[in-house]
Image (cartoon, grey):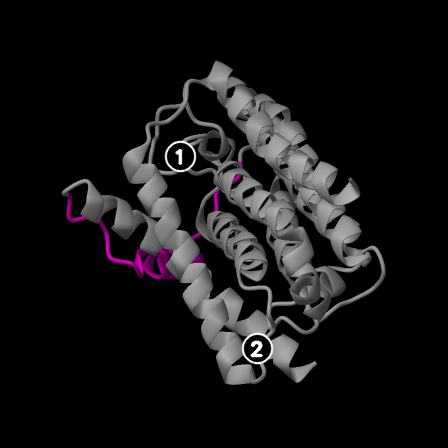
Amino acid sequence: MLSAILSLALLLMLAPLLPGVAARTRSLLTGRRGPPVHQLYIDLWKLMRRGVVYSETTTPIFRLAPIVVAATVVIAATLVPLDRTSSVLRFSGDAVAFAYLLGLGRFLLVLGALDTGSSFEGMGASREVTFASIVELGLFFAIATLAVATQELSLSGMLGAPLGRHWAQAAPSLVMVALGLFSLLLAECARVPVDDPSTHLELTMIHEVMVLDHGGPDLALLLFAGAAKLAVFSALVVALIVPAPARSLPVALAILVAGTVGVAIAVGVVESATARLRLPTVPLYLAGAAALAGFGLVLVVR
């Protein structure tokens, strides 16, 4: 339990660094200077010291949304075995709870966007739920593949020692799941080629347009939740790529840090090498990512 708590604390402290690593990688590969890797820490500190202004048209749902979004991501992180042995919270079927916790956070974020009465935020909310329906399908395909391969219903069982024992037999399926999860990570965390966190053009934004009316500590919670979600999905990808659990806590923490930073660098490489997709083609991209995990399920079932 102590190992799991330390791993969770390290991941949450490291989370704001990952978007900076991705942005810095993108800047270096495109010949620009770019912001420092610790820029999000600075932004969070500034936002936490500012006040909040609420529109008269909003209800308590708008104020509750940032809290629920951040809380659901942190609780979802407690279900992931970050140290490769066990998670802070573990029970049979917690993999399904993991997916639904993320879905609950998205639901409240969409409600908060609709609560403002803004047509732009309503447009972003519509895009978010449309694309999320395909992302969740791919996530459940990945969970089902791991459950069949390891005969476990808990994330600790799926991503712990059983996964290492079954890697030789299910290697093609696990590779497909890892690639599919990385592709879905780009959509779930609002990264290129699905979304661009640096754009401020309302007609093309998806996630950013839904948080236009948030400010101060509320916006800080949303930014931290986005960074934490990137960290959690990165940890999932790392667990699939490095299936063998570490024999000591320092090694496990080192793998967690190096792996999540490596995934952030990979995100920056993808963003520097690809352009944002046109909105009508985004469902095709997401369907392809979900199909990768689905093919992995077919292989393990067969």
The reply to whether residue 155 is visible in this rendering is: yes
- Whether 29 is drawn above or below 133: the answer is below
Labels 2, 1: front one:
2
Q: Magenta stretch containing residue 49, yes or no?
A: yes
Q: Residue furthest toward the right?
A: 92
Query: Magenta segment, which residues?
Result: 32-54
Residue 245 versus residue 283 in the image, above or below? below
Calculate the distance from the C-alpha at mark 2 to the C-alpha at mark 1: 33 Å
Q: Nearer the viewer, residue 251 or 96?
A: 251
Q: Is residue 44 visible?
A: no
Residue in the image at 30% along x and 57% along y:
39
Residue, disc 1: 192
In the image shown, does 67 or 33 lie closer to the viewer? 33
Residue of label 2:
246
Which residue sits at x=60%, y=35%?
A: 292
Crowding near the residue tagged with mark 1, few <14, some 14–19, many ≥20 C-alpha atoms within 10 Å: many
Q: Is residue 218 above or below residue 8?
A: above
At label 2, counting other C-alpha atoms closer than 10 Å, the crowd grade (few under 14, some 14-19, many 20 or more) is some
What amino acid does circle 1 point to? Val
Q: Closer to the camera, 92 or 218?
A: 92
Horizontal and vertical percent for residue 29? Answer: 21, 44
Residue 224 is inside the magenta segment: no
